[in-house]
Each structure stands twice: as C-alpha cells, then as structure tokens.
Image: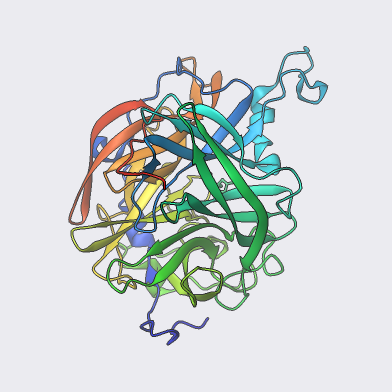
Amino acid sequence: MKTTTEKFGVTPHQPSLWTRADALKVRADDPTTTQPLVSADFPVLNNDVFIWDTMPLRDLDGNVTSVDGWSVIFTLTADRHPNDPAYLDEDGNYDILRDWNDRHGRAKMYYWFSRTGKNWEFGGRVMAEGVSPTAREWAGTPILLNDRGEVDLYYTAVTPGATIVKVRGRVVTTEHGVSMVGFEKVKPLFEADGKMYQTEAQNAFWGFRDPWPFRDPNDGKLYMLFEGNVAGERGSHKVGEAEIGDVPPGYEDVGNSRFQTACVGIAVARDADGDDWEMLPPLLTAVGVNDQTERPHFVFQDGKYYLFTISHTFTYADGVTGPDGVYGFVADSLFGPYVPLNGSGLVLGNPSSQPFQTYSHYVMPNGLVTSFIDSVPTDETGTQIRVGGTEAPTVGLKIKGQQTFVVAEYDYGYIPPMLDVTLK
Ligand code: FRU
C-alpha cells in the first residue's frame, strides 16, 4: 500500500493505527463511556417509515446550522410494510424485525424540519425517484453552502458498486415549513481504487461510503473523510507487530483477524467547489481489529482534531471486542498521529444489557451526540424486542484532552442549531 503522498501541498503521512492492544482496553459498561438505557416505551417519529442514520444540515466547518430559524436534518429512510404479505410471519403478524433488517436495500434520503431542534416534521424525499443512479441512497452529509440556501448533498450511491457522489439543490423556507428544491443531477466523485482502498473485486464485503466533507481549520483546504477498507485481496492482509501493539504475554495470537481491515479514508479537493477529488492514504487503519469504521467525522476543539467513527461488536476481529457505538481518536494535526480517546477508542457504547439499543452516533461540535434506536428488549431475557427506526435520546459529552465523559441526556432526536443563517 502507498503510505505517503505529496499532492496539492498536502504533507506526506502514515496512517495511524488502532491496535489490538488499544482495543483490549475497551471496557463495556464503564458509565463514563456508556449510553444511558433507552426505555422500551420510546416515541416513534413517524409510523410510516423507519429512519436510521441522521445527518444534520451543517456548514463546512462542522457547525449544525438552521435556516431562517428552521432546523433541518436528513435521514436514511425506508417505508415500513405492515400490510405487505411479504412481511407477514406464519401467524399472519407483521414481522417488523425482518422489515427493519431489510431496510438497507431500499434506503432513501429524506429530510425533516423543526423550529425547536426536536419533534421533527416530515419533509419528504430529497431526490425524486430515478434521480439517484443506484438502488440505495446511503449516508453522507448535507452542506449549507451560502445564504442563498444552496446545499451540496454528499452521499453514497450503492448497488451496483459504491460511489461517493454529490447532488446540489436549495433549501427554501416559509413561515410554515421547509422544502428542498433542485437535487436533480447527481455527480459521481470517486470510487475505491484498489491501491489504497479495497474494491468490491478484492472483497465482496468491502466498505466504501459515508462522505464527510470539511474545511480544515488550519490550512483552510477542502477535504473529505469517508469509510473504507485497506486495499488488498480479502485474506491477504498481515496482522504484524504494529497492528498488534503492546500486548501482555498470551495475547499474541491474532486468529483470523486478517479479515478485519477497516480504515478511515481521506480525500482532498483539487477545486474550491469540491467537484474534483484526490484520494489520499487513510488517516487511520484498524487492520486486525475491526472491519468497519463507519460515518467518520470530526469535532475541531481546543486546537485538536477529534476523529469519531461508529462501529459494531460483530465487526470486531478474533480476540478483541467492544460495544456497538462511537469510537474516537485525537491528534494535534489533521494527518495525525491519532491516539485513541480514553485509551481504547471507546467514547459512547451501548450497555451490555441492551447491546442494540442505538447506533450511528454523530458527535456534534457542541458535544451533543445524536443516534437512532435500533432495538430495545421488552422482557428480562432480551428475547422480546421492540424495533426502533426512530431518533434516540441525545447524549451530552464532555471532551477533555484525550478523555471523554458522558455528562447529560436530552430529549429524543434533540439536535439544536449552533448557527442560524438568514436566507437572502
Ligand atoms: C451506518 C450505515 C452506513 C451506511 C448506512 C447503510 O448505520 O451502515 O455506513 O451508509 O448505514 O444503511
């Protein structure tokens, strides 16, 4: 793998490593890094649709932005099928879990708006049917570009393939609500290259998605984070001393951990508009540790780069584990070196009694963390569950140096604006 670059004045860098030794420090149920229990009597945003990944409208510096006093979020969304014979079980009851688990295949971008940063009102689909070139509209980022209301929606066009794309439109407000206009022409930006980032041909289970564009607070250039896997044929990766890290005696065996190859990718724009991108080597790799570092994003605070990414228990490698939730790393400069927050990387995980209660956490610059409810047990044994597909209670974090602390819990889907833009 190419590990250095000298493009567009970007400093050559080595990816930072999330090591097996780091991951051995993960402690489930530490109250400072565990999301409070979500009660099974949660309210549902909308009974016609499931929603999961939530993408607040923001500016290129990361600030969550309202327009003319309206907060706006985008969500991955799929219809619920309570009356579809395909989703009835043997007893003729709606099999909501199967419907929920199938959602990724029909994910579409929707938007919602609110005057209060919660109790979101249904906006609708962002792109009309047929505009997006593939079956699935997967996660990304809506960027408010200016006070004319122009929005660049970066997202992932999936199946066939996985392409990072963008589509431009405009947010329009009235006293009564918000609408999205335009979003008619999708521009493909880039795909995995097989040299730095794994392709589908190299691994049918590859990940390449979740663009998060930003302006670097130090050099002012336009960059983009995304989720990837380290290039190479599936099974060919080496889990050596560097990937293992400083483990105690008896922890040298890496099992089949060569199959877990997540990385956080980065690209730099060659132009001011972000239409022309060059992929750079990953910022962070997790070879031998975890197979997915999804929805990577930054909080810029105290002159530091706080890199957050979501991951799952099921994507951990042999011999290491941790809860579903958000993990974080910190560096003094964009290209690292990054060190795991709280020693292990774990920032906010699900409690072990409700391992699937929430996912797809997004840490905002004000320390608030939004996520969605996946499923919550409704009995002691955890065999009965209630499926979510709705916004989880927001959690407040304090980020201090290389540590984070859970300090507050707020209402369901509370995503207050940090800036209000008055449209001209
Ligand atoms: C996170 C995620 C994203 C992806 C989307 C697919 O929940 O896996 O990485 O874009 O969901 O539904």
Residue at x-position 54% and y-position 63%: 228
Residue at x-position 50% and y-position 61%: 226
In the displayed image of the protein, which residue is found farthest to the right?
Answer: 85
In the displayed image of the protein, which residue is found farthest to the bottom?
Answer: 6
Residue at x-position 76% and y-position 19%: 89
The color scheme shown is rainbow
Location of residue 154 by image quarter: bottom right
Location of residue 241 by image quarter: bottom left
Residue 197 placed where, x, y %? 57, 71
Q: Nearer the viewer, residue 421 or 235?
A: 421
Looking at the image, residue 254 sits to the left or right of residue 407; the answer is: right
Residue 19 placed where, x, y %? 37, 64
Looking at the image, residue 332 sits to the left or right of residue 382; the answer is: left
Residue 51 placed where, x, y %? 56, 33
Above-or-below relation of 335 to 21: below
Q: Nearer the viewer, residue 214 or 402?
A: 214
Above-or-below relation of 385 to 336: above
Looking at the image, residue 332 sits to the left or right of residue 42; the answer is: left
Q: Nearer the viewer, residue 31 or 293?
A: 293
Residue at x-position 69% and y-position 29%: 99
